[in-house]
Amino acid sequence: MQTTNGCLRHNGDAPSTGDDLQNGACPSTANGQINGDPKIRSQADKDIIRLIGQHLRSLGLNRTTEQLIQESGCRLDHPAAAKFQTHVMNGEWFKAEIDLSELKSLLETPHALVEMKFLLLEQKYLEHLENGHVLEALQCLRGELTPLKHNTSRVHELSSYMMCSTGEELRGMSHWDGKGVLSRQKLMEKLQVYLPATVMLPPRRLQTLLSQALELQKDHCLYHNTKSTHSLENESLLIDHMCTKEQFPCDTVQVLNDHCDEVWFCRFSNNGQKLATGSKDSTVIIWDVDPVTLELRHRKTLEGHSYGLSYLSWSPDDNYLVACGRDDCSDLWVWNVETGNLRVKMNNSPEDSLTSCAWHKDSKKFVTGGTRGQFYHCDLDGNVLDSWEGVRVQCLRYRNDGKTVLAADTHYRIRGYNFEDLTDFNIIQEDHEIMSFTCDDTGRLAMLNVATQGVHLWDLEDKVLIRKFQGITQGYYLIHSCFGGTNQVFVASGSEDNKVYIWHIKREMPIAVLTGHTRTVNCVSWNPTYPSMLASASDDGTVRIWGPSEQYCVKRKHRSQSPSSNTAV
């Protein structure tokens, strides 16, 4: 019996066409064992058999694999590729180079042959060095690798390994696994990149396809809110992936009512371990997040503000918190969160209005401004480093580049301001007043709360409106929305109808509407570390913590009443 490209053929049978052989097709035979009317007709079926065979072989079920090959008539790989793999795994480099010549006609580009030969010789050189065969390694380097005139910088790097005195030093310096199955398997995977799939299947192809299918299902799952592991071990392949609403933060699991007036703002720290809330009662409360129970505990109250607090901003390192008031507030407070001490109270002029703030990524500078035309660049001590005159600021954000500040102004637009070269430029323009906005972690997407219009999602790079989210009641109240959940695929916003609305970023209609507050919900904040935790602040004087019902059902039975006035639902 002879073998052709990917299929079995009996002696004396008419050969199949080149196209059939290249694609692993089964040639017809006359004796009925692999008959003239083959069972495997479609290319899809042939591909599936190859995938199954590859997976069975990886499990060590070699006899089962051979039976599959025999009955179907389809081999897993081109015979020349299979021989090449055997020689690579055995470290028979001379034979592997001869095999490359046989595979040359099957490669898609001439460049692929050079790349593959370089990788082979690289492994050969390293194994010679590890074995202490310095002369053979030198011959490989000078007589085989260098004449290829390929990847010269890597050749120079390889030559430096000649100075290694031990195999351990060589492995550490080169980040190589050493001679053996592991390094040769990794080499084979690199080599397979240059071989067409019709010649040799990519490594673990069936697992790759299943993982891709699972990720696509998760991407289409409205309530998927857990980090993907890209592993099939904990997933069922027998049914489609589907998360239920019970796994989503839709239930009130705790009510914080330590404020004695309307709560205007809430924001989790960047590490997710704390929550800051600001109120009309002129206090800021810092709450600790219990990493085990995900309950919040009153840590400390920051007092001494002259006005109600309507905006809070954590420094990127979470050491400081800036507190701002409403339009008539000319003061700004910078607090050291750990000590609870006031770092500085900033008051540049009694005519100022400092209602918003954004931190530079170094946590040493910030910008602040308001609707009366103030726009300051400040250091941690409240010293004004620079200013922009006449910019009536509604909301501020630093871009990830650390140079550009985004500012929503009273002309219904968001503009970029660079304090280094003092340039400014338009980014987006709305038709109605932008009450507030926030950006996702990539800095590309911005979510705007627009007066009388609701929540709009913009792409700041392409400067296009992506989506208008439906359902929210947004008039002229200052409402702050947020991105959140795993990979920030959800957006949430408060509303003047006393509800919290949650949308999937790809859908206009809400996937959840949370009820419980009795007055306008001013602000929402999604915990960046615990994606199942969402906080909302309301004019009803409370902060509600939302979580999935199934996650908390057991914990609720064991909760005891907190000494404070906070309620665990």
Image (cartoon, rainbow, N blue to C red):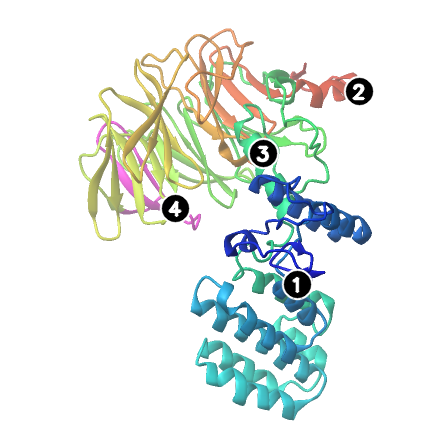
Q: Which mark is residue 274?
A: 3
What element does badge 3 sit on? strand
Q: Which mark is residue 558?
A: 2
| Range of residues picked out in magenta | 361-385
- Inspect the image, locate mark 1, and give the three-letter code of the amino acid beneath it: Ala
| N-terminal-most mark, 3 or 4 | 3
- Inspect the image, locate mark 3, and give the three-letter code of the amino acid beneath it: Lys
Q: Kindly report which numbered mark, 4 or 1, lies closer to the viewer in this rendering.
A: 1
Q: Kindly report which numbered mark, 3 or 2, lies closer to the viewer in this rendering.
A: 2
Q: Are marks 2 and 1 in contact (CB under 8 Å)?
A: no
User: Is residue 566 highlighted in magenta?
Assistant: no
Q: Which mark is residue 349?
A: none
Residue at 64%, 56% in the rendered image: 13
Residue at 79%, 53% in the rendered image: 62
- Inspect the image, locate mark 2, and give the three-letter code of the amino acid beneath it: His
> Which residue of the protein is positioned furthest toward the bottom in this rendering?
135
Q: Is residue 34 above or below residue 500?
A: below
Marks 4 and 1, Cα distance to the nearest angstrom?
Answer: 49 Å
Residue 220: percent from left, percent from top: 53, 27
| N-terminal-most mark, 4 or 1 | 1
> Which residue of the protein is positioned furthest toward the left in this rendering?
390
Q: Kindly report which numbered mark, 4 or 2, lies closer to the viewer in this rendering.
A: 4
Q: Which residue is mark 1?
A: 82
Q: Which residue is mark 4?
A: 400
Assess disc 3: are there few (<14), some (14-19) or many (≥20) residues with their C-alpha within 10 Å of its C-alpha.
Answer: many
| N-terminal-most mark, 1 or 3 | 1
Residue 228: percent from left, percent from top: 61, 38
Assess disc 4: are there few (<14), some (14-19) or many (≥20) residues with their C-alpha within 10 Å of its C-alpha.
Answer: some
